[in-house]
Image (cartoon, grey):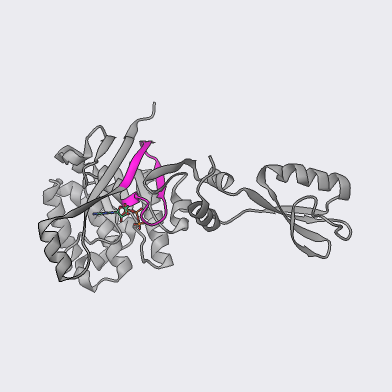
Amino acid sequence: MTELVIRAGGLRKSYRVIERDAGVRAALKNLVRREVRTVTAVDGITFAIEAGEVVGFLGPNGAGKSTTLKMLAGLLHPTAGELAVLGHLPWKRKREYLTRIAMVMGNRNQLNWDIPAIDSYEVNRSIYQIPAARFRSTLAELIELMDIGDLVRKPVRTLSLGERMKAEIVGSLLHVPQVLFLDEPTLGLDVTAQRRLRRFVAEYNARHGATVLLTSHYMADVQALCDRVIVIDKGTLRYDGPLSALAGRVMTHRELVLTLAGPVPDFSRYGDVLAVDGNTVRLRVPRDEAAAVTAQVLARHGLTEFSSVDPSMEEVIELLFAVGVRS
Ligand SMILES: Nc1ncnc2c1ncn2[C@@H]1O[C@H](COP(=O)(O)OP(=O)(O)OP(=O)(O)O)[C@@H](O)[C@H]1O
């Protein structure tokens, strides 16, 4: 039986924001009476994740992804709902919990800039009470997996962004956590460093059976690592399922490229004619009619070639965020 590592039910998080207009007068008024507004960042989401899954968390800016990850990692207290990770209430921040998870934020540094990463790692070793021999072997494994070698001996401030991110991740995983929350881990990295990091996450997942929840604006990260995606928008869950099925839910139409033996007659009765080039016509048809249209064209006109153009994942996501998911 598979083990459920994360269970969230009706999870909510609201922030209280103090409203303030600009200027001295507003500042004075604010001292007397504070206008407080509630921002609901996560508005009752329910999902469950099994051990060893690598799940992509997608959504436009401000959708509530970081807030959700922070609740899972115990950095924020949920306003309402149920949440259990590895059987723990994350916000209690129990030692037994914190030693089994890691949160990596692409836009935050955990390592001290003025000293080499290896010295910060020593600090982590004592915080997590990692036995010396295990620490050495894990460090060697992570350094090899991440291919950072002697860089860990240079002051962090002298490292490039990509090198620093690799060093950050090594530092976050020295206690060999079973659950990884990765919030934009490849943010700002060049393509080579992104690829390296992806390989690393895949390898770590395979070696340690770790459960990974990842947010990223780079679709390549999600495609390379996640079979399953959870899409949220304005704090609510819009899709939870295989990445491969997402296109089908979002794209209402398909593009067919049909090549006939002779010139193309008027094809407007089959769908939107996008282009005609010699004997080839590009046709846009409702997704669920694509097979029937192809069969009709084959029967009536004959086909020498046929293909259907699959949208790129970027296109799917762009459309998804623009129009939402069809239920
Ligand atoms: N500390 C805070 N105080 C008040 N509002 C906040 C706070 N943190 C986040 N928010 C608001 O909550 C909403 C969700 O923010 P969150 O950072 O979780 O979204 P996100 O999906 O991670 O966005 P992005 O892709 O831009 O990182 C946004 O409207 C944001 O402005």
Residue 279 in view: yes
* Residue that lies at the very extreme toward the bottom in this rendered image: 158
At x 44%, y 47%, the residue is 226
**Residue 276, located in which quarter of the rendered image?**
bottom right
Where 9 falls versus 24 (above or below)?
A: above
Q: Position of residue 70 (x, y in %)?
A: 26, 48
Please indicate whether residue 317 sits to the left or right of residue 235 in the image. Answer: right
Please indicate whether residue 26 sits to the left or right of residue 165 in the image. Answer: left
At x 82%, y 48%, the residue is 297
Q: Is-magenta flag for residue 47?
A: yes
Please indicate whether residue 124 sits to the left or right of residue 284 in the image. Answer: left
Pick the residue in front: 181 or 291.
Answer: 291
Q: Position of residue 99 (x, y in %)?
A: 19, 43
Q: Position of residue 238 (x, y in %)?
A: 45, 43
Where 161 falls versus 132 (above or below)?
A: below
Residue 99 in view: no
Q: Position of residue 192 (x, y in %)?
A: 42, 66
Q: Quadrant of ligand 1?
A: bottom left
* Residue that lies at the very extreme toward the top in this rendered image: 1
At x 33%, y 61%, the residue is 147
Q: Is-magenta flag for residue 102?
A: no
Q: How many numbered circles does the render carry?
A: 0
Please indicate whether residue 120 sits to the left or right of residue 271 in the image. Answer: left
Q: Which residues are magenta?
A: 41-66
**Residue 43, located in which quarter of the rendered image?**
top left
Q: Work out which quarter of the rendered image holds the N terminus and state it.
A: top left
Pick the residue in front: 181 or 224.
Answer: 181
At x 51%, y 57%, the residue is 318
